[in-house]
Amino acid sequence: MPPLPPFETILAIAIVIFFAIGLHEYAHCKFADMAGDPTPRIYGRVTLKLWKHFEPVGTFMMIISSLFGVGLGWGRAAPANPDKMRNPRWDFFTSVAAGPISNVVQAVLFAAVLRFGLRAGWFDVTEVVMGAFRMSNDFVPALLSLGVVLNLGLAIFNLIPLGPLDGHWLVGLLMPEKQNILWNQWHRRYGGQILISVILISQLSNIPVLSRITWPAISYLFKLLTGVPIDY
């Protein structure tokens, strides 16, 4: 097992994940509520008390796995009923998309502060790169770098079109109704199994399947947003 990151990095990871997961699930619920679906409000999920959106095991796994560069976990599933929405198909599409979009917005905000800090001389590029790779002893660049990396990672991972990830709902909602039903039925049966298999293969072998899917996009967007390259 690789060594634990510095304490400053561990603290930064915990803070970023608190907001990344909490606001992701809140965004799902808020947009469903705005579309007329009472379900999230009935379950007490239209709230900025972000801990109410956490699933203990999934949140713990997200923090622990993020310490070693993986970042896999989940929050409490957002309760929603498309049939209660004013425009079931497109309102549901919006409420699903709101989760990953919330993470992109957070990444952009962290990146804006990071760029300003670099220009102001608060820290240098080396500290930013060390922060992105979970090796920094300096809390501020670690927090800002990981705020970009982890939020981008969560958004991109969730857009993978495999159930139960957000991506499979979004792809299905772009299909005609009949194909959408068949798509969702297939993912209910097989999507989770395939996703777990991919995760296990990534962790138990020397084939980093998930990293090969997500890291090129994360590193490209990190450089685009911050101006700092973080390629391996």
Image (cartoon, grey):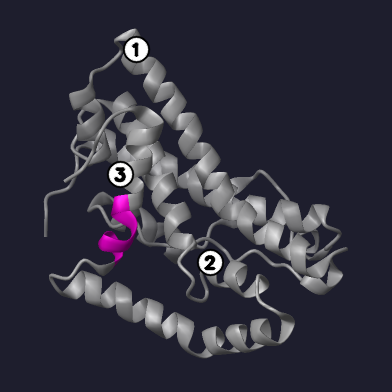
Task: State the image coordinates of residue 182 (x, y, percent, origin top left).
Answer: 62, 89
Residue denoted by label 3: 219
162 above or below 135? below
Q: Classify residue 141 by image quadrant.
A: top left
- Three-letter amino acid code of the residue under disc 2: Gly
Disc 3 secondary structure class:
helix
The residues bearing labels 2 and 3 have C-alpha atoms spaced at a distance of 20 Å
110 above or below 133? above
Labels 2 and 3: the sequence-earlier one: 2
Q: Are marks 2 and 3 in contact (CB under 8 Å)?
A: no
Residue denoted by label 2: 167
Q: For this rendering, which residue is in front, 99 or 68?
A: 99
Residue 64 shown in magenta: no
Name the residue: 55% across, 86% down: 188
From which residue to which does the magenta span run?
210-216
Q: Classify residue 138 by image quadrant.
A: top left
Residue denoted by label 1: 119
